[in-house]
Every structure is written in structure tokens, then in C-alpha cells.
Amino acid sequence: MADDFADRFWKTMCEYRAAVALLLGLEAVLLVLLFLALWLQPDGVGTRVVLVADFAFIGTGFLAASYVLYRCRQYRRLD
């Protein structure tokens, strides 16, 4: 029986597991740098809005990459 779309999708994503792990590491570094920038930013500066938006975007990417690696780990256990 042919694999359904979800199986083919996760099989393809797991082939790029090394690239996703690299992306996760890069995003972790960026999150640390953004946190430091937020902490060191003086009060009342308009740049804080941009930093918070960047924090949200990078955080979302971090969570997505973490989820892909989590699913790939589960997928390997089933095989």
C-alpha cells in the first residue's frame, strides 16, 4: 500500500534532519542575542518593539524546528 501524504512528508523532513538541527542551533544563538539586546536596551526606546517582534518570529521558528526534530525521533522509533 502506498504511503499517505503525512508519511511521505515526515520521511522527507527527516532526510533533512541535519539541516534542521543546524537551524535550531542558529535560532538558539539568535534567541540568546535577542534576549541580551532586550535586557540591555534602555527604557523608552522604540527599538524594543522591533526586538520583541524579532523575538516572536525567531521563537516560532525555534519551536517549529524543535517539533520537526521531535517528530523525526518518534518516526525513527517506529521503523
Image (tube, rainbow, N blue to C red):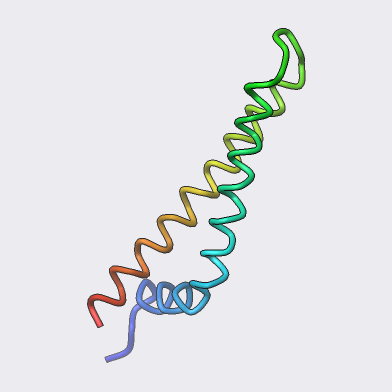
Image quadrant holding the C terminus, namely: bottom left
In-image side of 26 versus 17 (left or right):
right
**Residue at 52% across / 75% down in the picture?**
16
**Residue at 43% across / 62% down in the picture?**
68
Percent from the top left, x then y, of residue 30? 64, 44
**Residue at 60% across / 34% down in the picture?**
55
In-image side of 75 versus 44 (left or right):
left
In-image side of 20 versus 8 (left or right):
right
With respect to residue 59, does 13 lie above or below?
A: below
Task: Examine the image and state in which quarter residue 1 appears.
Answer: bottom left
The count of marks equals 0
Please identify the residue farthest to the top as the structure is shown: 44
Percent from the top left, x then y, of residue 5? 39, 75
Please identify the residue farthest to the right as the structure is shown: 46
**Residue at 37% across / 71% down in the picture?**
6
Task: Examine the image and state in which quarter residue 73 appears.
Answer: bottom left
In-image side of 59 versus 72 (left or right):
right
Front-lying residue, 51 or 12: 51
Front-lying residue, 26 or 20: 26
Please identify the residue farthest to the bottom as the structure is shown: 1
Percent from the top left, x then y, of residue 41? 71, 19
With respect to residue 58, does 73 lie above or below?
A: below
With respect to residue 40, does 24 lie above or below?
A: below
